[in-house]
């Protein structure tokens, strides 16, 4: 696996040929490595991902999975998933060949996270789902015989109880908001219609039908990496008409 040194910059680079998924032979070049070893590792990992062999490391399969997610999921959902995989999954499985990870390895990983007593069961249930999704991706697209995470089972979640304000609590809160304060209407809409805060912040005047007293919900506001985003709803059921009580002005 030859790599080359840039004498002027005193750095290493990888330059090699590979065959892409369409059967075309292409050249790949990557510069700027401080160590020869890093350039060699980059070439090895790249060729493993391109080959689709399940002898590749779990970390490389996770990269392939996240690349697929990035083109198909909302940026907020992708960012949450990528951070969880980076922080709680890759440190344990990064360098292991994905076809050598066993049910026992996964059970030990689950127990390690539970013993940390740092995360809610609900969150760990979600992270365990991300791990299973990576294995499912390998099974469906790269020929992994089975998903060991599915055999291991889930981390049982403790479903959090929803907390709702009573009308008395809401009225007590509204007494603290001045009558002419613009946010009063926003708080009224949130309480009496049940829409989410992201849905509220995405509303425009065109979404209101003042004659029929309805709001059209068809988008969602989010903020990611200091950028304001207007996104499509997560599911089709989130597209809906919501009635507005006539006493809200």
Image: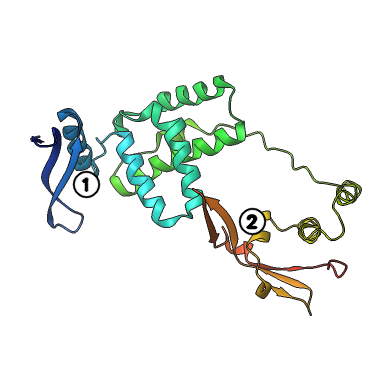
Q: Position of residue 84 (x, y in %)?
A: 48, 37
Q: Position of residue 72 (x, y in %)?
A: 42, 56
| 117 up-or-down from 4: above or below | above
Image position of 169 (left or right of 58): right
- Give the image quarter of residue 42: top left
Image position of 139 (left or right of 50): right
Q: Residue furthest bottom?
A: 211
Please give the name of the residue rendered at 42% of the width and 23% of the height, measured from the top-left corner.
104
Does residue 92 appear in this view? Answer: yes
- Give the image quarter of residue 55: top left
The C terminus: image quadrant = bottom right
The N terminus: image quadrant = top left
Numbered disc 2: secondary structure? helix
Marks 2 and 1, how far apart in space?
Answer: 39 Å
Of residues 161 and 71, the one nearer the viewer is 71
Of residues 55 and 4, the one nearer the viewer is 4
Numbered disc 1: secondary structure? helix
Please give the name of the residue rendered at 86% of the width and 47% of the height, measured from the top-left corner.
173
Image position of 73 (left or right of 178): left
Q: Position of residue 168 (x, y in %)?
A: 91, 48
The mark lying in front, picked from 2 and 1, is: 2
Q: Position of residue 30 (x, y in %)?
A: 18, 43
- Give the image quarter of residue 135: top left
Please give the name of the residue rendered at 32% of the width and 40% of the height, measured from the top-left corner.
61
Numbered badge on residue 168: none
Does residue 102 appear in this view? Answer: no
Q: Earlier in the sequence, mark 2 or mark 1?
A: 1
Q: Which residue bears the numbered disc 2?
A: 198
Please give the name of the residue rendered at 56% of the width and 36% of the height, measured from the top-left corner.
125
Q: Residues within 10 Å of mark 1 (few under 14, many from 20)?
A: few
Please state the total of marks drawn on the protein image: 2
Q: Which residue bears the numbered disc 1?
A: 50
């Amino acid at each position: 696996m030859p790599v080359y040194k840039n004498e002027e910059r005193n750095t290493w680079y990888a330059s090699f040929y590979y065959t892409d998924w369409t059967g075309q032979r292409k050249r790949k070049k990557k510069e700027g490595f401080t160590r020869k070893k890093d350039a060699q590792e980059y070439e090895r990992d790249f060729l493993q991902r391109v080959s689709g062999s399940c002898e590749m490391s779990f970390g490389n399969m996770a990269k392939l999975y996240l690349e697929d997610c990035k083109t198909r999921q909302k940026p907020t959902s992708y960012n949450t998933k990528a951070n969880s995989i980076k922080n709680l999954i890759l440190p344990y499985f990064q360098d292991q060949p994905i076809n050598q990870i066993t049910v026992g390895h996964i059970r030990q990983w689950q127990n390690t996270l539970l013993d940390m007593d740092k995360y809610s069961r609900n969150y760990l249930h979600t992270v365990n789902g991300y791990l299973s999704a990576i294995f499912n991706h390998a099974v469906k697209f790269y020929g992994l015989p089975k998903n060991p995470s599915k055999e291991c089972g889930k981390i049982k979640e403790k479903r959090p109880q929803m907390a709702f304000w009573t009308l008395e609590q809401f009225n007590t809160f509204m007494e603290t908001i001045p009558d002419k304060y613009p946010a009063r209407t926003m708080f009224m809409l949130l309480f009496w219609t049940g829409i989410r805060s992201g849905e509220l912040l995405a509303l425009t005047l065109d979404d209101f039908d003042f004659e029929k007293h309805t709001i059209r919900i068809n988008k969602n506001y989010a903020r990611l990496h200091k950028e304001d985003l207007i996104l499509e709803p997560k599911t089709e059921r989130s597209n809906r008409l919501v009635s507005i009580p006539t006493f809200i002005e």
